[in-house]
Image (cartoon, coloured by chain):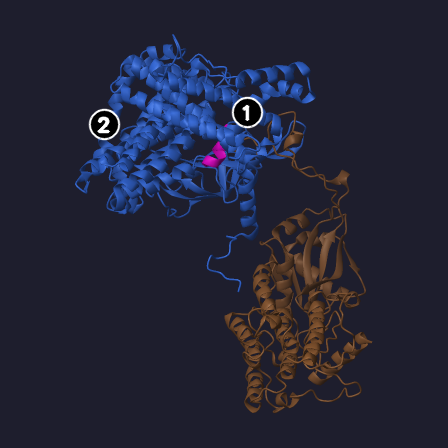
Amino acid sequence: MSGCGLFLRSAAAARLCRALVAFTASRRPLRTSSPSQAFAKELFLGKIEKKEVFPFPEVSQEELNEINQFVGPVEKFFTEEVDSQKIDREGKIPNETLEKLKSLGLFGMQVPEEYGGLGLSNTMYARLGEIISLDGSIAVMLAAHQAIGLKGIILAGSEEQKARYLPTLASGERMAAFCLTEPASGSDAASIRTRATLSEDKKHYLLNGSKVWITNGGLASVFTVFAKTEVVDSNGSVKDKVTAFIVERDFGGVTSGKPEDKLGIRGSNTCEVHFENTRVPVGNVLGEVGGGFKVAMRILNSGRFSMGSAVAGMLKKLIEMTAEYACTRKQFNRNLSEFGLIQEKFALMAQKAYVMESMAYLTAGMLDQPGFPDCSIEAAMVKVFSSEAAWQCVSEALQILGGSGYMRDYPYERILRDSRILLIFEGTNEILRMYIALTGLQHAGRILTARVKELKQGNVTTIMETVGQRLRDSLGRTVDLGLTGKLGAVHPSMADSATKLEQSVHVFRRAVESLLLRFGKTIVEEQLVLKRVANILINLYGMTAVLSRASRSIRVGLQNHDHEVLLANLFCTEAYYQNLFTLSQLDKYSPENLDELVKKVSQQVLEKRAYVCAHPLDRTS
Amino acid sequence: MSWAQAILLARGLSRGWGGICSTALTGAPFSQVPPQAPRGLHCSTAAHNPDSSLVPRPPEPPRGLVKALAPHEELFRQAPDRVRDKASFVQAVQNFTQYNVHKRGHVDFIYLALRKMREYGVERDLAVYNLLLDIFPKEVFQPRNIFHSIFLHYPRQQECGIAVLEQMENHGVMPNKETEFLLIQIFGRKSYPMRKFVRMKLWFTRFKNIDPFPVPRDLPQDPVDLASLALRHMEPDLSARVTVYQMPLSKDSTDGTDPTEPHIIGIQSPDQQAALAHHDPARPIFIEGPFSLWLRDKCVYYHILRADLLPPEEREVEEIPEEWNLYYPMQLDLAYGRSSWDDYEFNIDEAEEGPVFAICMAGAHDQATLAKWIQGLQETNPALARIPVVFRLSGSSGELLASSSGLEEPPLTPPEGQEEEENNQQRQQQSQS
């Protein structure tokens, strides 16, 4: 593994190295595509980039020791001192808790050490996230502060801006917030209304507008604000473009509304922020003028992977609590744990936790490799999978608990409320699915275009080749992508699952090809198809992650690795059949494909803007 | 049964059957009935022209005696000062049954009552229909043997029963269990009224909700309410807002349609507003109308504000801005589009029309009134101030067209009963001759 060298160095050297890397990164022009081929994109072409995902990323012993030193006190603090129930009831994180969080350094986990942060790698950040997520409000507050709030300064800030803001932000002296959403603009950057106009002396921008649903909006004193500015094009025409600004509350004209009353994460502060003739110095432009769109995209794409480990941490705790209940509560002289339907739920929770943990740490490990790999698809997949699994598992946990799960005296209903936001923020899962599918299809399309063109033009050789390949496929040629067998990347005890993954990848490539052939660039409009493509890809990534992790566990000899093998096989088989079903739905005219019906129903409902059917008790006579 | 009676019955049967045929198949050419039939024992004077229902036929129109009162007319004349409502109608029917224990002439009375129902405003009242059916003596007309049921038994009475059901049908009244019970009691299961009843039961339910855009049964009387209902009815966009630009000057003076200050009500959807805002001010827009719209028996007129279709070379191609969606690409950088296999668009020759920006209904169709509408529209559509507006008003209000086609003729307001009968008689005579 190419990243190994990095981990073998001493912790201090590694950190220095990262700091240097971060330093060079800041001066690189912003870029969305990556130099190295990412794993997920290659799946669209039917390839498994083994060197990216096998073996499962590891950290060095020193780094592990160091992080364990951190984890200990943080965990102690969260289990003993944080009163989540009180935070939820009062809708506020108490000051002493905030102070303790600051003293633990949790406000600057990913801020480079030279600026007073902890300078954690992505893997380490994910590890701490597991513990922080034990309280949803604190997790969200910290994420809004550092995963998006100050991330812009790390990613795109100038040296001066970093030196000016990062130390106070990392120490928690000041809090950061990310101001993008507006009443009329969610994911639509074109409808941003906040405006920044250059003053006469060209030294200041005057910022005007309001932003809604800003986490930490009432507490923060440093805001990353996105606003429209006039930019002169290369050909001399004036255009409105988005620019990112670092805005301090002290600049004046910054007001925040009253905190919103929310369903969950009630302890976090969410409110409107208004800017009225706020004077922002020219030096506080983040990145280039007119380059705010890319800054926003980079910030959003960078923060998602950590949700996987955070949810996994929460789920592990939840499994403990519910298992305790299930093994002590007696009904009909038997423990709840003896009932099959209850056991099933625990298997589900364990499986989901295992998969999302594997995905999260695999992605974190990939991100920690040198060369700034673009893992935004992987991160989005982790986010989608973990948020949906969280909702499903918490709901099942409540089911196990029965009535007490519904009571406010117990923490479960709060966990349920808190976890609902996961599917919504940081890009809703629907939108991320579009991102996953479209980015991958774009990649595949570029490669396949030449072939598809030839097919469309009726090039005989290409058609013969394709037909021949299809014939061979249909004759049951075994797919071998090199995961199994002697010296295979996957341990033989999971050979079956590995074969399933290989087969799925192979069939997926064919499906992608035929989809591109069928729809071309109009596939953007086929959201139901894209959703399925994304679902398949998420399953494939999950399968890869668990196979990789379980193989490592066996080979290294970790404790209870046989349990991991069980979970891996369970998930792979389930995902394999799910994928087969989804793939059959992608076929044209397949009986499983109900898209036309679905579209018709929704169209009629939306036309009437109501439930259409007559009441079952209605009569005509 | 005597021979003579049998012959008479057979004749009656053929006529009665013909009558039923001709009502079922309106204007059926094979109606066997001579235009002017002599009155037989059970025979009906089946003189049905295609467009007349069974009802308005007076029982026996002797030529020359047009003005003669129909029998039992006096029952409905008892109190000229009394309000004509359900109670008085029921009273009249009860009077008939009370004073006429033997129910002599009940068929004539039922026909008369059917004609009177509209005047009393009970033409949609199921209970009244059941009351009318209840006048028939029970069990007398039921067939007693197989021949009775094969041949039309008591055709005049059966026809009368059918007439009651038909009038119910015309007014959309669904018969109920009681109707069924009465019909079985009077005519028996296999009788023609009963068959009609069964068919009504079957088809009424299926046709009741066949209109996807139903109009309420009782339309509002107020022209403003009626206009907003009509506008809502025409506008498919549920976000569209109805605006009253001008209320009729005084409601109490001249029934709301004062020529100086007529009502102006318009509808416009947000999409239409946006389209109007983007309209090129160099191109004029037009007010066209009046066009007619029928809501049940009422005709209303509307005007539209529209523009001509842009010539293809001037249409803006909607392009996707480069930095639009923060989360996923809005377009793929691929060289080819959808394959023809997945292109489900049928090749339809569509005549494209220019955009419609707003619809209005006004009490008057002149330019001055419509100019007020445009003034009102300018408040929400500032762009309208810069766009030239051309009035393209057709002189005829469309009424002529409606009456000449004769298909959607609005029922006349019910005149005095006598006159209506006269008209009917005259019409009938004309059609007979």
* Rendered position, B6 above or below A590: below
Judged from the image, the secondary structure of the residue bearing numbered disc 1 is helix
x and y percentages locating residue A227 in the rendered image: 52, 37
Residue A24 shows up from this direction: yes
Task: Decide which of A127, A213 is in the foreground and name it.
Answer: A127
Residue at (64%, 63%) from the top-left corner? Answer: B230
Helix, strand or loop under label 2: helix
State the hue of chain A: blue
Label 1 marks which chain's residue? A
Q: Which residue is mark 1?
A: A512
Colour for chain B in the figure: brown
**In which quadrant of the rendered view does residue B418 lie?**
bottom right
Q: Residue furthest top?
A: A486
Left or right, A90 with respect to A376, comes to left
Chain of the residue on which disc 2 is drawn: A
Q: Which residue is painted at 47% across and 24% down in the image?
A: A158
Disc 2 residue type?
Pro
User: Which residue is disc 2 drawn over?
Assistant: A73
- The CA span between labels 1 and 2 is 48 Å
The main secondary structure of the magenta stretch is: helix
x and y percentages locating residue A30 in the rendered image: 52, 23
Q: Quadrant of the N terminus of chain B?
A: bottom right
